[in-house]
Image: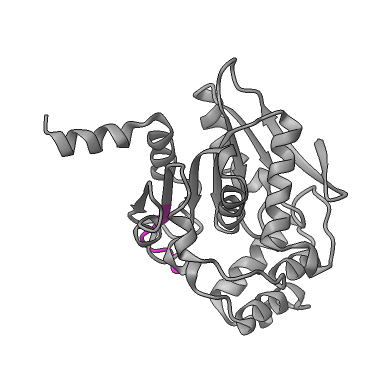
Amino acid sequence: MATFTSDGLDIAYDAREPAAGGAWLILVHGFASNRHEGWRRTGWYAALERRGMGFAALDQRGHGESAKPHDPALYGRAAMARDVLALMDHLGADRVDLFGYSMGSRTALEVALTAPDRVSNLILGGVGDALFTPRETASTGAMAAAMRAADPETLTEPMLRSFRQFADEQGEDREALAACTEATNPPLDPAVLGTLPMPVRVIAGMQDRLAGDPEALAARFAYGKGVVLPGCDHFSAIPHGLTKAAVFDFLDGVDEEEDDVGLWGR
């Protein structure tokens, strides 16, 4: 297991060096997941290796094999973003392509807002315009309570049960996950998104009840485009071939070429 240090915490990661002159793709997983479950098991490592792409995936603090503090003050978006920037520094990567999923998208977006000159292309998966909906104390408290519940069978809300089951399956530290949900973050200003200079792709499943509309979120960026994945929900989208196709087409510039054809004619 490779590690680096960020804010005094040990952060675990995997990396595959890009070819000479190639770009790094940084992968940032979602809540209650980890680099192995979020990216390796879902086929992303294998797909990237087949394409000869360099990539690195970290376990966000509180997850996987990284440090798991139980203090909510250590889990704000800015702190999570510092971990990604510290990984980039550790790899010697001045600029990267950045791909986050679900909570990882919030982290990736914070990285782009903090250091826009270090992100060449930004991919936000499993999110949409619900990103602008403030998280109510009751909902974050419910997730924390679900993580702390002695008996998961007492949970009646399907989404809370899904996340609790997922955390248990991964053997995650549920107290650390509860602290993660209790972090305090400033509200996201939609107007700031339009200042980002990099191309942005927002990708979410048509049946994703958590994300909201990816096209509405994409419209907030100066160079954004939304992709709706038919037949996918929040959990099935990440391993799906449609998601991989959307990401690789974006990084390859295929969809920009299609847009040009549509604009100027064949």
- Residue 210 visible in the displayed image: no
- In this figure, what is the number of numbered marks? 0
- Indicate how the structure is coloured in the image: one colour
- Please state the horizontal and vertical placement of residue 195, each as a whole percent of the image: 46, 52
Span highlighted in magenta in the image? 203-209
Q: Quadrant of residue 43?
A: top right
Position of the C terminus by quadrant: top left
- Residue 11 visible in the displayed image: yes
Identify the residue at image location x=83%, y=51%: 7
- Please state the horizontal and vertical placement of residue 255, each as a whole percent of the image: 31, 37
Residue 166 against residue 89 in the figure, above or below? below
Q: In this view, does 3 lie to the left or right of 143?
A: right
Q: In this view, does 173 lie to the left or right of 121?
A: right
- Please state the horizontal and vertical placement of residue 50, each as a whole percent of the image: 51, 24
Residue 66 against residue 52 in the figure, above or below? below
Identify the residue at image location x=60%, y=59%: 103
Residue 196 against residue 76 in the figure, above or below? above
- Please state the horizontal and vertical placement of residue 229, each as a whole percent of the image: 36, 52
**Residue 71 inside the magenta-drawn segment:** no
Q: In this view, does 195 lie to the left or right of 7?
A: left
Q: Nearer the viewer, residue 72 or 189?
A: 189
Position of the N terminus by quadrant: top right
Identify the residue at image location x=73%, y=56%: 79
Q: Nearer the viewer, residue 100 or 153?
A: 100
Q: In this view, does 216 lie to the left or right of 135?
A: left
Identify the residue at image location x=67%, y=43%: 36
**Residue 208 inside the magenta-drawn segment:** yes
Q: Quadrant of residue 41?
A: top right
User: Farthest residue in the top direction?
Assistant: 20
User: Farthest residue in the left direction?
Assistant: 265
